[in-house]
Each structure stands twice: as structure tokens, then as C-alpha cells.
Amino acid sequence: MIYVDVSAAVHARAGLGRYSEKLVTALLDAQPERFAIFYNQGRDGQLPDTLRGVEEKHIRLGYKPWRMAVLLAHLSQISFRRLVPDVRLFHSTEHLLMPLRNTPTILTVHDLIYKLYPAYHKKLNYWYLNLAMPLFCRRTRGIIAVSEATKRDVVEYYGIDPAKIHVVYEAAAAHFKPPKPAEIDRVRRQYDLPERFLIHLGTIEPRKNLDRLVDALQMVRQEDENLSLILAGARGWLYDDFLARIAAEGLENVVRPLGWVDDADLPGVIAAASLAVQPSLYEGFGLPVLEHMACGQVVAASNSSSHPEVGGQAAAYFEATDTREMAAVIQRLLREKGEYTRRRQSGLEQAQRFSWQRAAQETIKIYDQLLTNS
């Protein structure tokens, strides 16, 4: 049996949770008899409805104790195979590789943010990942990177053989599609959305570069004072300074965090916006870019890391640290209706190039290669 760790989905950890849930769903659709799931339920984790009824093994241990147990087991050469006794191959979909002796394993590496931007991580998390990830990358039989950018980082910083790393792209979920006008009106009323606004989809944390986005917004508002910014996403970490700045500058009515938005409502919220802006300093994949495009929204994005891979020719790019360039790109897209229309159609086509069915087939091919060679 091939086991896939879906702990991130059980604890709804933003992009990692979406990745594990959607990948496993597509794997089960393709070859249901081959797959089972493993997860650490913790104290209050909830298995997504889409994964209920799937053959599974799970434990109940706090997040931090489980991470430490996994690391110490690696350092002590202890196997956890008793937790999944019938395993033939184990796939860890987040940055935590369960130690399994005489069993091929695959580790998905989403990003090396902790390595490239250490100031943007909590100290304990930074310490853990910098100690554990090089070990996990060496011990695992194969690595799936979610972008060529992430693959390059793993090769450069950990000296891993490129042949061991396979790039498999993510995709927008099927419900990310252009919503009907009635649905846009519904979410506009439900969330009390302004008439004209920029939308940013993602967790509030330092690498998302939201301070510079607010600076760019204020430049644009010198000519368009009715434009505001909506932040759709949960609060991540180290966000206090950003929220304090919004309050100190009296921008509460201009910059509004919606918090976690229900998945079913996201397409309507995205489509209600005037423009999507993703200014992140670094993204392992940058799934929100695809989600915006799949909903028919035009995207202005930073040209950092994986964004150009994901957005292709459809997105309009700017230098992440150049606030004036960011503002200029936003202004141009809002003014130039012809370009806006072309990029909207191009974005819909770009999003269709990615699918979870394709990701599942490419992942299964990697599984089969490892099983054949084990």
C-alpha cells in the first residue's frame, strides 16, 4: 500500500493543506486501490470530508511533540514502520519525513523560505527546519519540488543530486472558475465588499510583502481615492507590526483583512475585485496566482521565485522591492482596458494548463520508478 501523509489537510495549514488534500483526491480518482492515508490528528484535527472513508492510519500527538519525535527518530536511526505496517512507499506532503527503515519514501519540498528569509520565521521553526530539512532531503529516496525555482534552491543549498528531484506543479481546485454575476453579488453583500478594490489572497506574514503593497496602494490612491485593498487569508505569523501600522495610519477603512474565507466563497470574492495583486518576496509555487486566473481575474505579481513559471505570459510583473514599479503596473492595468481584457483571457488559458489530474499522473510515475528500483 502507498501511504500519503495528509496531516497538513487535517489541520488546514493553508497551501500545504490544500496541496495534500487535492493531490490525494486525484490519486484516489486515478487508482483508488493503491492508496491509503496517514495523519497526525493532534488534539482537534479534522479529516476533510473529501478524504473520509479512505483507508487510513493515524495517531494523536501534539504538533510539536510529533515533529520532535520524528527528528529524534531520524537521529537515532529508529523506524516508525509499526505505524504503517503494510506500507510499500510513503509520501510526506509537508516538511516532515517519517523515518521508515527499508521503505522508499518521497518528500515534497514546497520552499526554502526558512533558509532564504530566516527573519520571517519564528525562531523555533527556523531552528527545526534548518536542522531537519537537510537530513530529510538526504534520507528520502526521492524529492518532489513544486516548481523549478524550488528545485534550484534545494540543489544549491543542500547539494542534492538534481536527478533525485522531480518537479510536479500544483493546480487550482475545480471550483475556482468564473462565477456568475448573482454569485458575485451574493459575496459582495455577505462580506460587505467595497465597489472597487485590489484583492490579495494568502496568509498574512512578512514574506507576502504587504507593507510595500500598502505603500503602492497609497500611491495609486492619489489619483483613485476610492480604491481599497482586501486581504483574503488567515493570519500567519509575525503579522502584528503590519496590523499595527494599518491602525496607526488610520487605514482601517482602506485596508481590510477578511480573515479565512470559505472556499466556496473565494471565486466570488476574487471576481468582485478590480485586480489581483500578489507581491510576495518568495513563493515555492504561488497557487493564488492560478486561483485568481482560473476565476477570470487579472493578476499583477512580483517577478520573484516561481511566479513567472506559474503566471507565464498572462500575469503582469514587477520587481518585488520596487514600490513605484508595483504602483505603476497596478495603475496601468486599471487604466488600459484592452490589456486588461487580453490578460484576463490569457489567464484563463494559463490556468487550464495546470490540473490535479496531471499532477497525480506525474506523481504516480515517480512512485512506480521508486518501487521498481527499490
Image (cartoon, rainbow, N blue to C red):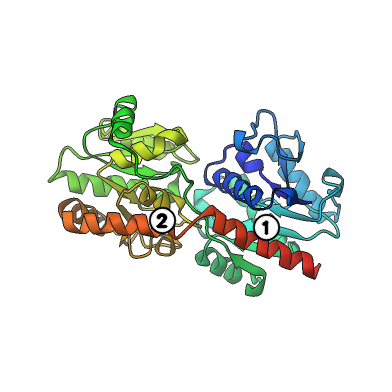
User: Is the Cβ of the residue at disc 2 closer than 8 Å to that at disc 1?
Assistant: no
Left or right, residue 356 beside residue 353:
right
Name which residue type carries label 2.
Ala
Q: Pinpoint residue 288: horizontal percent, then vertical percent.
A: 42, 49
Above/below status of 349 relative to 81: below
Query: On residue 351, which mark appears?
Result: 2
Which residue bears the numbered disc 1? Answer: 107
Query: On residue 67, which mark appears?
Result: none
Left or right, residue 45 beside residue 248:
right
Residue at 55% x, 44% y is 18
Front-most of residues 161 and 18: 18
Left or right, residue 52 beside residue 268:
right
Q: Pinpoint residue 334: horizontal percent, then vertical percent.
A: 19, 50
| CA gap, disc 2 and disc 1 | 25 Å
Above/below status of 3 relative to 364: above
Above/below status of 279 relative to 365: above
Front-most of residues 301 and 121: 301
Residue at 27% x, 58% y is 343
* N-term mark: 2 or 1: 1
Q: Pinpoint residue 139: horizontal percent, then vertical percent.
A: 75, 62
Front-most of residues 337 and 317: 337
